[in-house]
Image (cartoon, rainbow, N blue to C red):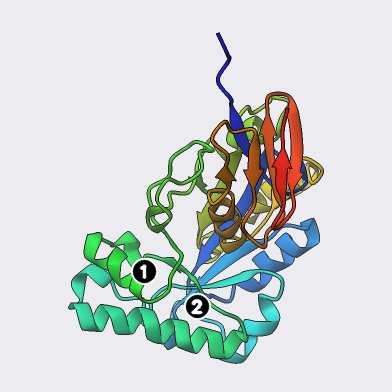
Amino acid sequence: MKQPIMDSLRFPGGKTRALTFSYDDGVLQDRRLVGILNDCGLRGTFNIGSGVLGYVDPTGLMTKLQPEEIAPLYAGHEIASHGLYHSAPTALGGPAALYEIIEDRRRLEELSGGIVRGFAYPYGAYDASVKQLLAAAGMAYARVVPSSGNFALPTDFLEWMPTAHHNDEKLMDLAKAFCGEQRFPHPALFYLWGHSYEFDQFDNWHVIEEFADYVAQFDQTVWFATNIEIHDYIQAYRQLIYSADAGMIYNPTATPLWMARGRDTFELAPGATVRLA
């Protein structure tokens, strides 16, 4: 009896693992966090409500960045939306919720000079109608608050569940399981999220410093990417076209893609048709 064909996505370079960060609110502490990520060669996504940039928190904890800081500070990372005024979209009427999404996108694109396609739900609030508004506004994905505790790829990018918050007591155990010698037959994704002001709030900057220093050692086996890069890569892979007997695979996208079949890992060039044994 012929054995079934088992194909599996691989990340760029044939890597089986990818790691990304998602941090909210555009607060002053992002300056230090971005420095840590840059020093370690890591990359992430920063979710910003452009309507509250420049806000000065009387406690000093959640003071926001100035608009002119956005582009230079987050260079090399992704800027995503967090709602114009950080309002819970489920508490607004449809037109107001849509305005919060699309106007924040427009302002962030003006500030950054790039296209904004990602979103993080303010207060983690969303429902089916909010997801429809996001899709209509051109948002490719949206991050939720509950964590999965695992390394699975998202099935619904508009309900993208992170692996863990940085205050998870099992954070380093997860990191070691993810980066260690264990082989992953399927692609694995570590998605860390939080707010950088929490490191001041709990006086625990050592948590992210230890995590970043540890995972940075594995740059040969882990793809460090932004949220939108991971989204676009997975979506491109899902567009592969197979022949009837699965002996040929056509890559219709402009993205070089990697996959594994059995013990073999290979690259599918943009526009190429690969014939397999």
Counting from the top left corner in percent of width and height, residue 71 is at 65, 83
Numbered circle sitting on residue 135: 1
Counting from the top left corner in percent of width and height, residue 74 is at 66, 75
* 103 relative to 8, above or below: below
**Residue drawn at the location 82% of the way across and 43% of the way down:** 220
Drawn side of residue 50 relative to residue 70, left or right: left
**Dot 2: within a 10 Å radius of its alpha carbon, few (fewer than 14), some, or many (20 or more) residues?**
few
* 257 relative to 135, above or below: above
Pointer 2: what residue?
Answer: 60
The amino acid type found where label 2 is placed reads Gly
**Residue drawn at the location 50% of the way across and 72% of the way down:** 117
Q: How many numbered circles are shown?
A: 2
Drawn side of residue 208 relative to residue 170, left or right: right
What is the secondary structure assignment of the residue under circle 2? Answer: loop
Residue sitting nearer the eye, 197 or 7:
7
Numbered circle sitting on residue 11: none
* 198 relative to 77, above or below: above
State which quadrant residue 123 falls in: bottom left
Residue sitting nearer the eye, 190 or 156:
156
Q: On the rendered image, what quadrant is the N terminus found in?
A: top right
**Residue drawn at the location 68% of the way across and 25% of the way down:** 183
Of all residues, the one furthest to the front in this rendering is: 244
Q: Are marks 2 and 1 in contact (CB under 8 Å)?
A: no
Residue sitting nearer the eye, 70 or 232:
232
Counting from the top left corner in percent of width and height, residue 32 is at 68, 68
* Residue 87 can be seen, yes or no: yes
- State which tag comes first along the sequence, 2 or 1: 2
